[in-house]
Structure formats: structure tokens, C-alpha cells
Amino acid sequence: MTRPTRSDRTRQLAGLAPVIPVLVIPDAGLAADLGRTLIGAGLPVLEVTLRTDGAFDAIRAMADLPGGHVGAGTVLTADDARRARDNGATFAVSPGLTDAIVAACDEIDLPLLPGVATASEAMAAREYGFDMLKLFPAEAVGGRALLKALSGPLPQLSFCPTGGITPETAPDYLTLPNVACVGGSWIAPEADQRARDWTAIGARARAAAGLTRG
Ligand code: 3PG
């Protein structure tokens, strides 16, 4: 049996808070205040998606915030992983898993949380040595029912489900033994970021940080 080794650090990160905010940051100038708000509210692990022009600058602006762990999400290529690391990201999240991304993350020693959506993909990830996986897009591919079903044949795998999770459904996900944490964009919607409504974002983050696991 392959001994998983590639997930040691992402498993540690997943243990730091029940929710990883998935951030689509419209303006890198907002990133430092956003990061301080989230970390201060008890969510230290931040996923900055590479979906906006300023994403790498946002990662750079958040990378040195005390108490934070900033990673890049929506990593689709080896180059994304390298640029993320060069801008200070300490982990990478991908919606899927490709040979090129695994090789790049190994080469630059960047912990990777790869995405899977099926048993076969989870088994392939395990063969690579990953045992902490993102389930994506969680709600669309079966959500809690799928996670419960996967825990039978694949009890050694833990998941961070992401995609379609809400403040209402997050607590139920977190009761599942194979769910280490959940990810979601509901904490910091773009409109609240643009309005610099750190009070609203902070309140959602505090509620998320207070959710209990297992
Ligand atoms: C992701 O990038 O992981 C998801 O798109 C986040 O999903 P959500 O916006 O439904 O929370």
C-alpha cells in the first residue's frame, strides 16, 4: 500500500480551522484588510483563487500577515503553481489533479490539495500519495451522501468539500468523520469586499470559525 506522504502539510492546515474561505478578490488593494479581518476572526487558512487579474498581487499582500497561511486556489497549470509560490503562497489548491501540477508542486516543495469528484479520482490521488483531498464541486457531485459512501471503501481519505456549500449546510458536512474542513466563498462575497464591509465579513468568519467538527 502506498504510504501517503504528500498530504502531511495540507492535513495540518485543514486542522487549523473548520472553514477555508475561498476568496475571489476583485482588487489586490483590498487583500491586506480582508486577510486581517479573516485571520482576526479565527480563519487563518486563506485560499486566494487565481481568477482575477490581481490574484498574485493579492497573495503577495496577504503572505506576510501574522498568523495567516495563504494559498492559491484554482491552480490549473504548473506555471500557476510556480507563480503562486513565487508570490508567497504556502499551499496550492486545484479543482483537479494532473501529472504536471503534481510534478511542479513537488519540484518547488509546495503542498497541494488536489480536487477529486469520483471514487476513481480519489484512488488515483491516493496512488500519488495524497490522503487529504478537495471534493469538488461538492454539492454538484453528491455532497454529503457521496462523502458518506466514500468513507466505506476509502476510510483513510479525508476531504475538504468545496463548491456550493452554504452556512446552512456547512455544519452537517463537518459532522462527517472523513471531512476535515470545508471551503466556501460565502464568507467574503465580492460585493462586501468592494464595499469594504469588514464588519459583515468578520461576522460571517467568526460564525464559521465557531463551527464544530466531527
Ligand atoms: C472553489 O473554487 O473551490 C469553489 O468554486 C468555491 O465554491 P463556492 O463559491 O460555491 O463556495
Image: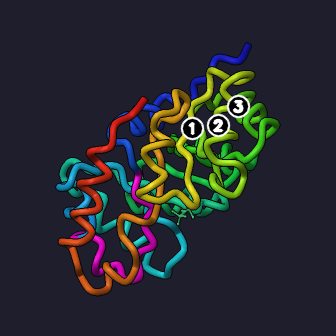
Q: Is residue 28 above or below residue 118?
A: below
Q: Earlier in the sequence, mark 1 or mark 3?
A: 3
Helix, strand or loop at label 2? It is: helix
Q: Callout 2 environment at 10 Å: few (<14), some (14 to 19), or many (20+)?
A: many
User: In the image, which is nearer the foreground, mark 1 or mark 3?
Assistant: 3
Q: Is mark 2 within 8 Å of ligand 1?
A: no
Q: Is mark 1 within 8 Å of ligand 1?
A: no
Question: Residue 86 in the image: x percent, y percent?
Answer: 44, 59
Residue at left offset 50%, top offset 66%: 49
Q: Is residue 156 above or below residue 68?
A: above
Question: Residue 194 in the image: x percent, y percent?
Answer: 32, 85
Would you identify the image quadrant in which residue 26 lies?
bottom left
Residue 159 disc label: 1
Between 22 and 107, which is closer to the camera in this rendering?
A: 22
Residue for badge 3: 150
Find the magenta span and give its range. 20-33
Amino acid on which the number 3 mark rests in the picture:
Leu
Residue for badge 2: 147
* Image marks 1 and 3: residues in contact by CB distance under 8 Å: yes
* Image marks 1 and 2: residues in contact by CB distance under 8 Å: yes
Question: Residue 130 in the image: x percent, y percent?
Answer: 63, 32
Helix, strand or loop at label 1? It is: strand
Label 3 vs label 2: CA separation? 5 Å
* Image marks 3 and 2: residues in contact by CB distance under 8 Å: yes
Label 1 vs label 2: CA separation? 8 Å
Amino acid on which the number 1 mark rests in the picture:
Phe
